[in-house]
Amino acid sequence: MSPRHPSDYDESDVRVRPGRRGSRPRSKDRPSHEDAIPGFVTAVDRGRYTVLVGAGVGGKKLPERVVIAMKAREIGRKGIVVGDQVELVGDTSGGPDALARIVKLSPRKSVLRRTADDTDPVERVIVANPDQLVIVSALANPEPRPRLIDRCLVAAYDAGLDPLLVLTKADLQDPSDFLSHYAPLDVPYIVTSTSGDGFDGLEALQDKLIGRVSVFVGHSGVGKSTLVNGLVPEAHRAIGNVNVVTGRGRHTSSSAVALRLPGDQGWVIDTPGVRSFGLAHVDLHRIIEHFPDLEPGTEKCPRSCSHDEEECALDEYVASGQAGSAGPSRLESLRRLLRARSGESD
């Protein structure tokens, strides 16, 4: 019998399995992962997560160990950052070649986020579950940047975090004048200075960190990583110098990392040095709420006042002295922030 020509075939000669799309249909059932163990994300590096498993994490008494993990498919596109509480399955032994899977991300109680700039609609979560924002600024070399500090304060208040201002290099510059600008806000602060081989003020800072998860932010060169090394000697965070031409520090940390304080007294999260702190995620009308020294003056503002116009009542309020001696500089800072936040040139 001679073979049939292809043109002799019709659709009745072809057997098609109903519903067949080249692979077995995926089941809607998902594994419950009842054997998953809790962990705390301490570092993230190119899709690999360093997770602390053990005593004090998730309420389970397990041998403490560090586990490297990857994100499981069921997590989807959810981002995982330092500070997240997660659940793991797979090889959680913590051995050199072990790799576990993160199968669950626990709800976050707080997040510190920022945007690339004030017009970027995409917000980026920097750290999960902190309860204190430590804003580090040098008093000299490099010069302090009050407006960056103001932005960090707005981000802290918006996230429900307690702010703490830490001023370094007080041996180079008296802090009194600088602190006067923040006196109306009652922001707690610590002043540190270099003293021989150590720091003056380091013990006072340690006391503020006990029992808390504190995230450190500040622009490069202010001594942030030096402080972290003083608090956690085994951290060995890289330290950069300030460029003598630009007056700016060199980035030495490329990613955030959580470090446990000696004696298990709390956590500090060191973040890369920042040169900007976008606030596109903060509602424009809420920014004034984070300037409590100025907010009472808005009661006489016209409806829908932008607080940066001729009819704004804040000018008269500040001129009367009701906002305190720092009122003019604080109002200037507020308005610069409002203009930048709305995408207008300053």
Image (cartoon, rainbow, N blue to C red):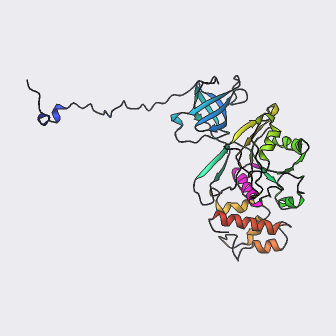
User: Residue lying farthest front?
Assistant: 245
User: Residue lying farthest bottom?
Assistant: 310
- Residue toward you, 309 or 52: 52
In the image, residue 251 lies at what x, y percent? Answer: 70, 48
Q: Quadrant of the N terminus?
A: top left
Q: Is residue 255 above or below residue 93?
A: below
Q: Main secondary structure of the magenta part?
A: helix
Residue 83 visible in rendering? yes
Q: Is residue 137 above or below residue 83?
A: below
> Quarter-wise, where is residue 176 in the image?
bottom right
- The residue lying at 88 percent from left, 53 percent from top is 170
In the image, residue 339 lies at what x, y percent? Answer: 67, 67
Residue 82 left/right relative to 319: left
User: Residue lying farthest left?
Assistant: 1
In the image, residue 34 lies at what x, y percent? Answer: 57, 25
Q: Is residue 149 magenta?
A: yes
In the image, residue 288 lies at what x, y percent? Answer: 72, 63
- Residue toward you, 37 or 47: 47
Q: Is residue 64 magenta?
A: no
- The residue lying at 80 percent from left, 39 percent from top is 229
> Quarter-wise, where is residue 236 in the image?
top right
- The residue lying at 27 percent from left, 32 percent from top is 18
Numbered range of the magenta stretch: 146-162
Residue 210 visible in rendering? no
- The residue lying at 63 percent from left, 38 percent from top is 44
